[in-house]
Amino acid sequence: EPEVTQTPSHQVTQMGQEVILRCVPISNHLYFYWYRQILGQKVEFLVSFYNNEISEKSEIFDDQFSVERPDGSNFTLKIRSTKLEDSAMYFCASSQQDSGANVLTFGAGSRLTVL
Amino acid sequence: ELKVEQNPLFLSMQEGKNYTIYCNYSTTSDRLYWYRQDPGKSLESLFVLLSNGAVKQEGRLMASLDTKARLSTLHITAAVHDLSATYFCAVWRGKIIFGKGTRLHILP
């Protein structure tokens, strides 16, 4: 069964460092998303991406965050200068369409720990 | 702002019992999802409900949707330990907005 692949599975970084989280969505999917989940809390929307541009972003997705689809397969989330409160599990998701049943398939997540 | 509220947030129950998780949402939507998350794992899609009165069943889980009441339920029949997980209700408004999740613990 096709899956969304995320790397790294766990990254530890110092506050103020840049981090790039990588995702390979399912190959025929067109819509891409990043969500985050602080330990034990709800899953929060960060950003959606379609046709090589951001469709929507949340208040969390400030100037420190950016997304990119540098080639035909990867979808990346960059945090320019990490803060302690950025520690969370980051989930990438993709879907084939944004109408009808439109199930988002989630990756296994990248756990980010900021020290 | 769309709000998605689940209750209960935590549920501990005995194997063999039935129970229902409730999900209320604050504005209209044409799609409601239920996802399952095991500890430290990703989110697994269980159901997508698209219309008023929709009911879907998979094994011991059954989900329903009342769009007029803005209410969805996830019913667990004769619970087994393997169903222990966190269950999220989520609503579509251009993106998926999740509820806080219901942590279900089924005692053997």
Image (spheres, coloured by chain):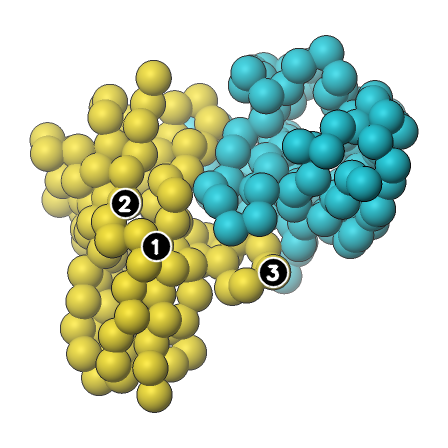
Q: Earlier in the sequence, mark 2 or mark 1?
A: 2
Question: Among the chains, which one is yellow?
Answer: B
Q: Quadrant of residue B14?
A: bottom left
Quickly name the residue at label 3. Answer: B40
Please, what secondary structure does the residue beneath circle 2 have?
strand
CB atoms at circles 2 and 1 under 8 Å apart? yes
Quadrant in which the N terminus of chain B appears: top left
Q: Is residue B19 above or below residue A107?
A: below
Q: Are marks 2 and 1 on the same chain?
A: yes
Q: Chain of mark 2?
A: B
In the image, is B77 to the left or to the right of B32?
A: left
Q: Earlier in the sequence, mark 3 or mark 1?
A: 3
Q: Colour of chain A?
A: cyan
Mark 1 residue crowding within 10 angstroms, few (<14) / some (14–19) / many (20+): many
Please, what secondary structure does the residue beneath circle 1 have?
strand
Q: Earlier in the sequence, mark 3 or mark 2?
A: 2
* Amino acid of disc 2: Gln
Please provide percent x and percent y for residue B54: 19, 47
For the residues labelled 3 and 2, the Cα–Cα distance comes to 21 Å
Quadrant in which the C terminus of chain B appears: bottom left
Can you see residue A85? yes
Q: Chain of mark 3?
A: B
Quickly name the residue at label 1. Answer: B102
Quickly name the residue at label 2. Answer: B6
In the image, is A30 to the left or to the right of B66?
A: right
